[in-house]
Image: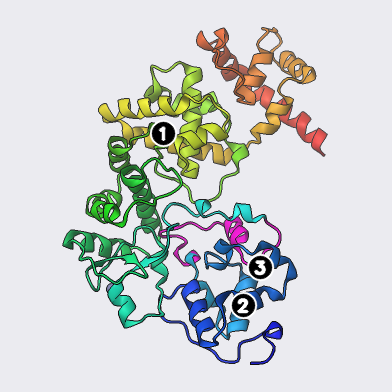
Amino acid sequence: MTDPARLDRLPIRIPPVDGESWLGYTHRVAAFYHLPWRTLMRHLILNDPHSLRYWHMPRLAGYAATTPTRETFAAFFRLEPSEVADMHLSRYHGSALDFPAQLTLALDPLSTETDPANASLGSIGRLVSVRKPRGCPDCLRGRPDHRPLSWHLTFHVACVHHGLLHVPLDRHTPIPADTNTIDAQALILQRLTPHPENRRFFTTLELILTARVAQGRPHRLNAKTTSLAEALPEVVPLAADPDPSIALSYALDTTNRLGHITLPRISTEPVDPRWIPPLLPTRHLIPHLADLLYPLPIRRAREVAACAARMSLTGESATAACSVLGQRPTTPAAIHHTLRRLQSQGRLGHFLDATGRASHALLGEQIDYPQRALHASRPDLIAVANQIVIVASGMAKSWLVDQWACTYTSSRERTTSRDGRLENYDREHGPAITAALETILNREAA
Ligand SMILES: [Zn+2]
């Protein structure tokens, strides 16, 4: 071979094996050319000197790549861009995993625009294994250089062809798997085709596996293979049940740390965090959730409901959602308590439906709540509100903070909120004042 530093295309096409991972393929190619893997990968990204700064494993291990990157890689290896795509974990987008465009960009090996800190495994989800690779010893004996892509998935713990548990790749002792585990494993692997029903299956699987085996680590599912293998026959039927409250009920019974509870995710689209305020607007609480959250005081109910909305839109745990929203740290306990109460009343399904409706309402409105919070104390806007109401009731100031911007300022419940006056004010005057304020803010922004 000539000077490898100037290589821009490999001389020979080495066809990928069906189901092969990008990491496995590039190692196989490097071995073929008698090159260290790092040297080969360095050639691949040499065209772009900036990318060397971002020498970062997740980006080179084959999680996701943008279209231009796939084309660059395909040209270098003499592959089709679709063959490159099929070897990346983003192949499971829409089934086991979720790769929104932003995440693909963050994980792209040739991207120079994003900080590699964003490209953390945590953002892909708990269904990608963060441990050393494992696989079937019999499969490896038959094909020592083949690394299936699905071996990167947390829940792939047993080989359905050989009936063996996956073990570290350098260990060759076979451990037979239970037949129930093999049956459950086969059912999971059949669901890897992208489809909304399969996506729902895997989000539920993630929720209940986390509750069953995550052992207090909210971002990881690095339980022992044997614990996962043992859990599969129990959790697969629950994940396959179309009623999400069945899985949530199971998660409530098995989660040992209450702040780690998650809700079934209702959206796979990235959600703009600005659209979810620290307090759910009263207009969405009253029709959907007020009844289910009773006897919580209305202000506390709005807080719990906003946290639940964020959880169902992002898949975050109660602790994570509560912290992003800037709420008090006792909210996860309040959520857990509420879910337990609803579970005992047989109303978990109603709660999930109602939270879903409130969450979709927030998405539909796309209100920039942090921006409202910035303006909520402006005397001129308070004056506008008072002009509209005619009989100034002294409530405009509170209304702007509490009902318009939905900010969380303190844990104290306002007297006007406790006795319902603020809510009445909102019902009567809220829409008119909101319209007037929007006109002002739009004019200022123009
Ligand atoms: Zn095998």
Q: Secondary structure at mark 3?
A: loop
Indicate which quadrant contains ligand 1: bottom left
Cβ of disc 2 within 8 Å of ligand 1?
no
Disc 2/disc 1 C-alpha distance (Å): 54 Å
Disc 3 marks which amino acid? Answer: Leu
Q: Nearer the viewer, residue 364 or 329?
A: 329
Residue 87 visible from this viewpoint? no
Disc 2 marks which amino acid? Answer: Thr
Disc sitting over residue 258 in the figure: none
Residue 356 vertical placement versus 330 (above, below): below
Magenta-colored segment: predominant secondary structure: loop
User: Which residue bears the numbered disc 3?
Assistant: 110
Q: Identify the residue shown where x is 41% and y is 59%.
A: 96
**10 Å neighbourhood of mark 3: few (<14), some, or many (≥20)?**
many
Q: Quadrant of residue 78?
A: bottom right
Of labels 3 and 2, earlier in sequence is 2
Residue 106 lies within the magenta run: yes
Range drawn in magenta: 90-114
Residue 101 vertical placement versus 437 (above, below): below
Disc 1 marks which amino acid? Answer: Ala
User: Which residue bears the numbered disc 2?
Assistant: 39
Residue 98 lies within the magenta run: yes
Q: Secondary structure at mark 1?
A: helix
Image quarter in which the N terminus is found: bottom right
> Horizontal and vertical percent for residue 127?
41, 55
Of labels 2 and 1, earlier in sequence is 2
Q: Identify the residue shown where x is 33% and y is 43%.
A: 244
